Image: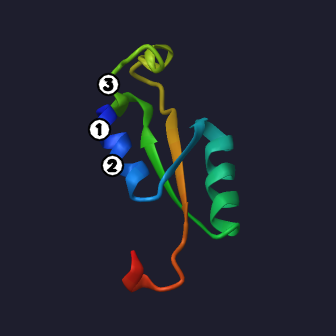
Amino acid sequence: MAADSVDKLKSEGWVQQFTASGPRLEEAIENYRMLGYEVKAIPIKEFGGNGCTVCFEDKNDNTVMIFTRKKSRHKWMT
């Protein structure tokens, strides 16, 4: 995922939260949904290996970046 793709997500109202994996990932997604947020979990590997993601280059790493946005009350507004 290129920087312009992250900018596009942000322009659509998505907020970058944090990276997570394993049990904490599922817990975070569930908690955000219970609070009324839409959640996108994007594999960190899709961020292109810039300096911020170099720690996650292991092939077996399933770490994702969590993005959230408040759900719209009306589906036609999204």
Element type where label 1 sits in the image: helix
Q: Residue at x 68, y 42 (%)?
A: 24
Q: Which mark is residue 48?
A: 3
Res. 42 image quadrant: top left
Q: Position of residue 4 (x, y in %)?
A: 29, 38
Q: Nearer the viewer, residue 64 or 61?
A: 64
Asked if residue 58 can be seen in this view, the reply is yes
Q: Quadrant of residue 50?
A: top left
Q: Nearer the viewer, residue 23 or 17?
A: 17
Q: How is the image coloured?
A: rainbow
Is residue 61 placed above or below 64 in the rendered structure?
above
Residue drawn at (39%, 58%) of the image: 12
Residue 72: percent from left, percent from top: 51, 77
Task: Tell me which amino acid carries mark 1.
Answer: Asp
Q: What's the residue at 48%, 26% (across, down)? A: 61
Pointer 3 local density, CA inside 10 Å: few below 14, some 14–19, many at least 20:
some
Q: Amino acid at mark 3?
A: Gly
Looking at the rendered structure, the secondary structure element under dot 2 is: helix
Q: Are marks 3 and 2 in contact (CB under 8 Å)?
A: no
**Which quadrant is home to the N terminus?**
top left
Q: Nearer the viewer, residue 31 or 72?
A: 72
Q: For mark 1, what is the residue?
A: 4
Kindly give the residue lying farthest to the front in the view shown: 11
Q: CA distance from mark 1 to mark 3?
A: 12 Å
- Callout 2 amino acid: Lys
Name the residue tied to disc 2.
8
